Image (spheres, rainbow, N blue to C red):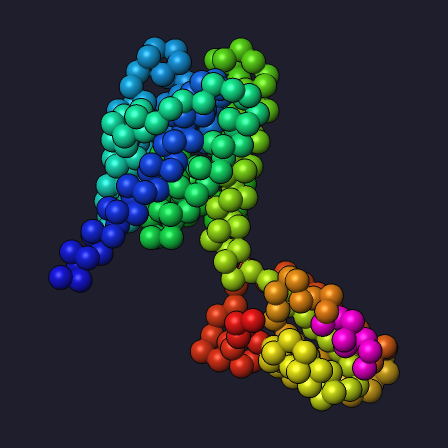
Amino acid sequence: MKRIRIIFFDILWDVIGATLFDIGIYCFAVNAEFAPIGFPGLTVILNYLFGFPLGLTLILLNIPAILISFKVLGTKFILRSAKTMIIFGLVLDYVVPYFPQYSGNHFYACICTGVFGGIGLTVVYLRGIASGGTDFIIMAIHKLLPHFSIGQITWVVDGSVILLGGFVFKNIDAVVIGLISVLITTIVVDKIMLGLNAGKLLFIITEKGELVANQISSLTGRGVTFVDGRGAYSKSEKQVIMCACKLNQVNFIRKSVEEIDAQCFLIVTDTKEVHGSNVSQSFGLAST
């Protein structure tokens, strides 16, 4: 029963993700004549040159990618992702053509392609699945050449497709808006996948730790963690207070801390995610 439920939700989210992603391709990128990321970009190019059906072409392009990366990425992952890839292709040919195509400003089209594409891919990625195509190739290359980051490999692979689109469409704008579309897709994926729990992490070095901690707790409801520290030069004992908070609380906390200890040393850094069994107590992630 559990297995059937997992498969059902995999397919459900695949359809949702595929619909969003394919809207970006069919409704915006095709008429704007630029190549978006990866195999969908190659699909748009082949459709422009030869009139090949978008979805079927996308599926056929994925077959060699699956064969190449099968041993590297593992059977289970490849089979689940192959299912997703087929759904992406079917939705592209039989679902999104019922949506109206946008024929306005190409720059707006590339923004919409990036946004819809990013949201669609995130829906799939959150299930631990790839959408096929260059995802397989990128992940296989990264596994074979781990000293190259996924981001670096992605830019090389997707950048090659975008440059090819510029030659095919005979328009430098196709390269520019293709790059913008990829950038927007990347930002959307990162913001959704990593930004849900994103915030700021404060390190406050002070000699008035208890007072500062009480001030933060009373004004914001945030908990803190104490870390003992000692100045390497002065040899004086200090307390380091660590506190995770939301972006809009940083200035409020900073001002309240400086009221107690104007000589404190405060470091503010980005944090993508905070996990742990005592997160709400030690990192102050209680709802506000």
Q: Is residue 76 visible?
A: yes
Left or right: 202 in relation to 22: right
Q: Principal SS element in the magenta part?
A: helix
146 above or below 288? above
Count of numbered badges drawn on the protein: 0
Range of the magenta residues? Answer: 253-260
Is residue 257 inside the magenta stretch? yes
Q: On the rendered image, what quadrant is the C terminus found in?
A: bottom right
Name the image quarter holding residue 133.
top left
Which of the pair 156/260 is nearer the observer? 260
Q: Residue at x 77, y 77 (%)?
A: 257
Q: Position of residue 96 (x, y in %)?
A: 32, 29
Q: Position of residue 206 (x, y in %)?
A: 78, 81
Q: Is residue 144 visible?
A: no
Which of the pair 280/60 is nearer the observer? 280
Left or right: 265 in relation to 85: right
Left or right: 120 in relation to 227: left
123 above or below 271? above
Q: Residue at x 73, y 66 (%)?
A: 251
Is residue 233 inside the magenta stretch? no
Q: Residue at x 61, y 71 (%)?
A: 244
36 above or below 78? above
Q: Position of residue 79 (x, y in %)?
A: 23, 44
Q: Name the residue at the left extreme.
A: 1
Q: On the rendered image, what quadrant is the N terminus found in?
A: bottom left
Q: Residue at x 61, y 65 (%)?
A: 246
Q: Position of residue 172 (x, y in %)?
A: 59, 16
